[in-house]
Image (cartoon, rainbow, N blue to C red):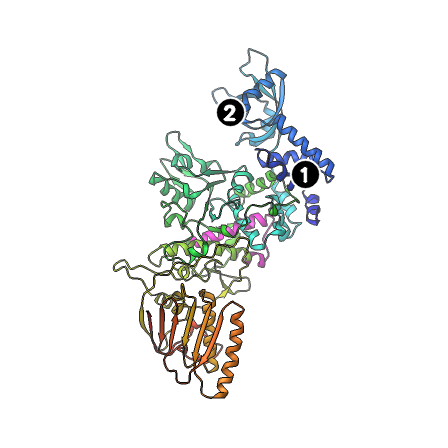
Amino acid sequence: MDALDEKLLGVFEGKVVRKDLVHRIKKGTNVPTFVLEFLLARYCASEDPKEIQEGLEAVLATLQDNYVRADEANAAQSKVATKGKHRFIDKVHVNYIEKEKRHWAALENFNSQRVAINEKFYRDNDRLLEGGIWAEITIGYNEIEDDDYTFYVEDLRPIQLSRFDFDGYAAGRSKFSRDEWLDIVLRSVGLEPTKLSTRLKFHFILRLSCLVEPNYNFIELGPRGTGKSYFFSEFSPYSTLVSGGQATTPILFYNNARKRTGLVGFWDVVAFDEVAGIQIKDPTTIQIMKDFMANGRFSRGAEVIADASLAFNGNIDHSIEQLVNSTEHDLFIPMPREFDLAILDRFAAYLPGWEMPKNSSDFLTGNYGFITDYLAEAFHHQFSHTNRYEEVNKRIRLGQNVEGRDEKGIKKTVCAFLKILHPDGPPSDSEFDEYVAYAVEARRRVKEQMNKRKPDDEFARINLSYFASDGKEVVVFCPESRNATATQHPFRHSLNSGTKEDPEAKTRKAQTRTVVEQPSEVAVMVQPEIVSPKELELSEKHYTIFYGDTGYSYETIFGPYFTGAKSIEIEDPYIRMPHQIQNFVRFCETVVKFSSIKRIELITGYDDDTQKLDIEQKLGDLKQSLLEVDIVFDFDFNPNLHDREIRMDNGWVIKIGRGLDFYQKPQSWNEIGANDLSLRKCLETKVDIYKV
């Protein structure tokens, strides 16, 4: 045990279990995790290896003798009739039959719907009447022929909690720091937090968010084998997993024939696995799904209100770098074609599944965590009885690019993080800022992909931001698409001519303001395959930058045309003065950020030998710096050079009348535009872009 184990055992005695024992025994059984943990807590509550081994053998023996499998129901009933009584582990429901004016117990795997039960059992265990619970149950055989039942409940001991003390749970949480509690939650789901970065930890918390926040719409797309569906199939008895197939209105929402609400009325979370395989034949299903995802209600002959969250999981079979740099495809590529922009816009968060580690024993914990059922009860209580939205609403400040559904999604994600990590009260300012930044990124990932799909600017305000506790506005970017021109500045098809809008024209129309970029810790647990992006559909351009214009930067002018290039040649006689050399350094920074270019060649001029020595020294420093990022830089001098031209080996040539030095010198280096060239005023010059 480590210090956190000892502290957890001291505060939550009887509610924790060693998780490595669960992993060891789970592989050989098909029993719900919370059933295993109940038995392990009984038989393996020791640190002695010999006692633990004996306890594991006792657990296996108990499962062998007492766990009822559905295909063995007839044998189990025969065993009770032969022995007179027997103890089983099964899920028990109690139903009130109105015509008979009495209660009957129903055992799922024992396959009996008419088991007599004493009133004391369902009075002491409320949930027997509200969906049922797993329990150790002793079934007796009734030999009286005149009675109308064969079996009766002699004894019942709940495996799942029959009552949950949320106040005790919150009071226990107050004895731990945020980081300690974060690690405890991760250990409770079987993961070892010391193997994970903070960013990855937040990814796993986002997976759990549906379990605590009602009407929360979440999507995770990524490679196979990262455990996307585990949290919804094994962790909580309050979630259900729909594995592919046909998603119909009667199953999901409302069955008109039976006058009965579908899955959304009975579960906290309805999760869809392998979303690409979902078949939706009835168009009304999509419309009802839109209504439900928007406000938790829909009408289908009857007005239905439900709290279920919807989670969508799927696999991406493409390189992420290829997708974010593609002008034709986006990160929603696996989604069924029926899922239009109206559905996608209702997702509060998109978890980047490509960053998640593959399932491996290396990430499993051998330490203590909460018994799964205990933590699942804590989450269910907060799902049903706790609302943190007003608390978040009073505290959060979002930027003006955050629109209606952006705001709702961001706030609900923050609410979920507060419920999971701070059930006892508000977080600190720095912690709150972390959650807001993460929530903004998760929503921006949704909006960026919608912006790529939409032929107009409806979703173009993708630079979502928030105001940190120190008052600074922070624009948050998605790590995978931060430098992808095809995602940040997607081309627009004209409805009439099929032509495309100039990316620089869009930049000029964009609102210009200073932003502080949020540093993002990128967890390199799973590296995406590096594939050369498909060449952007670019066109020749001839335009004039007028005196005083803003909105032009090296990124907007050159960035799209770097695609596919490996080397670049610059002829510019005026890379000689200090500010001109600084401009060239900024141009090289653009090359590093926006391209895969590996070689830069410069030919420039000079006025005298003294100036030439100074230029050589400064460009020599730049050469060494570029070598550190695997770019070879060579330069030479031609005193008779006059033309200005930039040539790339992909065939594109860019000629700017003033070369790279087309910016006005700022009147003060403390004014807007001094550092961000897109905000700097320009001199008049012509730009010609053509392909050889």
The C terminus sits in image quarter: bottom left
Residue 424 is inside the magenta segment: yes
Three-letter amino acid code of the residue under disc 1: Gly
Q: Is residue 688 visible?
A: yes
Q: Circle 2 — which element?
A: strand
Camera-nearest label, 2 or 1: 1
Asked if residue 397 lies in the magenta stretch, the reply is no
> Which residues, given as a range, are shown in magenta?
405-433
Q: Please state the horizontal and vertical placement of residue 102, each as a whole percent of the image.
A: 52, 21
The amino acid pointed to by label 2 is Tyr
- Residue 20 position (above or below residue 140): below
Left or right of residue 655, residue 520 in this image: right
Q: Dot 2, how many residues are within 10 Å of its Cα: few (below 14), some (14-19), or many (20+)? A: few
Residue 48 percent location from the top left of the image: 74, 39
Dot 1: within a 10 Å radius of its alpha carbon, few (fewer than 14), some, or many (20 or more) residues? few
* Element type at mark 1: loop
Picture coordinates of residue 132 (x, y %)? 54, 30
Residue occupied by mark 1: 14
Q: Residue at x 52, y 65 (%)?
A: 472
- Total marks shown come to 2
Question: Badge 2 is on which residue?
Answer: 96
Residue 258 quadrant: top left
Task: Examine the rendered structure and indicate whether residue 199 appears above or below residue 226.
Answer: below
x, y percent for residue 41: 67, 36
**Who is closer to the viewer here, 314 or 90?**
314
